[in-house]
Image (spheres, rainbow, N blue to C red):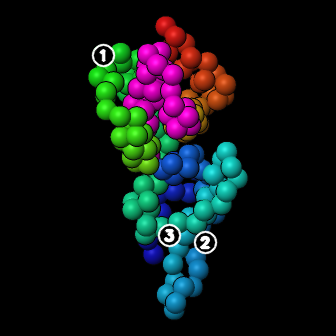
Amino acid sequence: MTTTPFKVGDKAVYPAQGVAEVVGIDTKEIMGSSQTFYVLRVMDSDKRIMIPVTNVDNVGLRMVMGDKELEEVYDILRERDVDLNQQTWNRRYRAYLEKIQTGSPYEIAEVLRDLNLLKFQKTLSFGERKMLDKAQRLLVQEMAVAKEATEAAVIEELEHIFTA
């Protein structure tokens, strides 16, 4: 039996989906072999996802960031000496999409920071605005859980960071 790093009730981050709660650990018989799954409920959509315990690393499921990671995310968000990539918007969009799909809070924070800074220089395209919204949603959700704060409080903090 594999030892499971997550327990029922734990919060975990599922890349590009956001924070999910482990609502169950089930064992199912599939093609003659027994397999154990985490049953996750994505917090903002109520979507249920089953992930084989043996596949956790492949899908990038991870614990919610801790205090040290949270501080590093704030450092990334406050950074202003940034080269705002002058490539075409669609290349930039693809690069940002790849960063979001990693599920890394650092990569998502970079996307959020860069798009917020870019917003002060020019009008964002529809795709960039959607990307900004997604990065903010994913990061705010995880930061709120990590800080045991409301999402509204985290959004207010971010607005202060980007308008300061």
Q: Residue 41, relative to residue 161: is it above or below? A: below
Estimate the spatial distance between the alpha carbons at disc 2 and disc 1, rounded to whole Å. 48 Å
- Which residue is at 47% across, 63% downward? 4
Magenta residues, start to end = 103-130
Residue 38, position as x, y percentages in the image: 56, 64
Instruction: Tell me which numbered mark, 3 or 2, is placed earlier along the sequence.
Output: 2
Residue type at numbered disc 3: Pro
Dot 1 corresponds to which residue?
A: 81
Q: Residue 5, relative to residue 140: is it above or below? A: below
Chief secondary structure of the magenta span?
helix
- Residue 124 part of the magenta-drawn span: yes
The residue nearer to you, when weighing 150 against 118, is 118
Q: Is residue 100 left or right of residue 153?
A: left
Disc 2 vs disc 1: which is toward the camera? 1
Q: Quadrant of residue 80?
A: top left
- Which residue is at 58% across, 76% downward? 27
Instruction: Tell me which numbered mark, 3 or 1, is placed earlier along the sequence.
Output: 3
Residue type at numbered disc 2: Asp
Instruction: Identify the image quadrant of the N terminus.
Output: bottom left
Label 3: how many Cα within 10 Å (few below 14, some 14–19, many 20+): some
Residue 129, position as x, y percentages in the image: 55, 32
Instruction: Tell me which numbered mark, 2 or 1, is placed earlier along the sequence.
Output: 2
Disc 3 vs disc 2: which is toward the camera? 3
Query: Is label 1 in a helix, a strand or a loop?
Result: loop
Dot 3 corresponds to which residue?
A: 52
Q: Quadrant of residue 29?
A: bottom right
User: Is residue 106 at all visible to an observer of this figure?
Assistant: no
Residue type at numbered disc 1: Asp
Dot 2 corresponds to which residue?
A: 26
